[in-house]
Image (cartoon, rainbow, N blue to C red):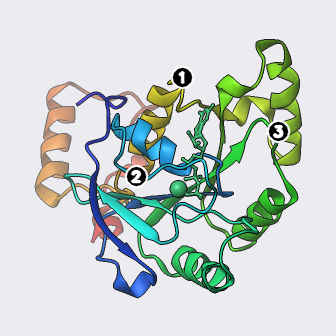
Amino acid sequence: MAPNSPLPLRFVMSGTRVEDLPPTRGEVAIVGRSNVGKSSVINSLANRKNLAKVSKTPGRTQLLNLFELPDGTSVMDLPGYGFANAPASVRARWPEMIEGYLLGRQNLHAIVALIDAEIGPTSNDTQTLAWLRSHGLPVKIVATKHDKVKPSKRDQRRKELAAGCLLDPREILWVSSAKHVNIEELRARINEWLAPVQEWTAPAPPTRKERAAARAAEAAAGPATDEDAPADDIDDEDEWN
Ligand SMILES: Nc1nc2c(ncn2[C@@H]2O[C@H](COP(=O)(O)OP(=O)(O)OP(=O)(O)O)[C@@H](O)[C@H]2O)c(=O)[nH]1
Ligand SMILES: [Mg+2]
């Protein structure tokens, strides 16, 4: 499958605690203010209309919503922060639920922090970014609602956004779920972040047989000159064993 084709996401479950979630082989979480467009981005990634619930009313997503890909990696839709009108009981649960998840989830490869390009970053956004960075979490910033900013204002907005997020303007990926802007690029990046983290392993040293074969090949190639065969290069047995 091309790296930027729709992600075949499947809804798995909603939970309130990280302990309730099934293990994942690698996860990307979407964080951001209420109404920034997290659930809309998930729908765009999958090219589906109602996979994640979207609403004009902030506070639509109130639980940890897990979506899975066929290879056992996953994407997490989180409830938004900074929504003052949520019921107190719900609001009280959020920091614990979101922070517990972000600090406790195993195999969390990337946290995509969405910033509303029309109004962001808000003080809530910058506090969240500072918190994520202070915990050394792998945060990736993506701006949303590209279509809501007039073309003539976009350069200036991009600069302000970048400055507010302590980034270079070129580092900001700016998407629109409504108008499908840069969604392919975001899919490609998510695929990259979900890819297994490869441990680097040193190549094995040549075996005795391989070294003997190499010496035989060298000998067959004819006498070496002084330059490429230093005299102390002959008996190196102990170096490898
Ligand atoms: N114009 C425009 N509107 C968007 C875009 N993305 C999302 N919206 C609208 O913004 C509102 C909120 O979108 P959601 O995706 O539900 O936002 P959320 O971040 O999941 O919100 P919570 O679940 O409350 O945290 C909805 O009315 C969406 O239709 C976009 O790219 N452009
Ligand atoms: Mg949502």
Residue tagged by mark 2? 52
Residue 44: image location, x then y, percent: 43, 36
Q: Amino acid at mark 2?
A: Ala
Looking at the rendered structure, the secondary structure element under dot 2 is loop
Looking at the rendered structure, the secondary structure element under dot 3 is helix
Q: Identify which residue, 124 or 90, lies in the foreground.
A: 90
Residue 85: image location, x then y, percent: 72, 68
Asked whether the beta carbons under mark 3 and mark 1 sit within 8 Å of each other, the answer is no
Q: CA distance from mark 3 to mark 1?
A: 20 Å
Disc number for residue 161: 3
Disc number for residue 154: none
Eyeballing the image, is 174 above or below 33?
above
**Mark 3, mark 2: which one is toward the viewer?**
2
Q: Identify which residue, 164 or 205, lies in the foreground.
A: 164
Looking at the rendered structure, the secondary structure element under dot 1 is loop
Q: Where on the image, by quarter, is ligand 1?
A: top right
Residue tagged by mark 1? 179
Judge whether residue 35 can be spotted in this image: yes
Residue 122: image location, x then y, percent: 84, 53
Residue 159: image location, x then y, percent: 86, 31
Q: Residue at x 25, y 43 (%)?
A: 8
- Whichever of callouts 3 and 2 sits on the residue coming sooner in the sequence is 2
Q: Residue at x 87, y 59 (%)?
A: 123
Categorize mark 2 by other alpha carbons within 10 Å: few (<14), some (14-19), many (20+).
many
Q: Residue at x 40, y 52 (%)?
A: 52
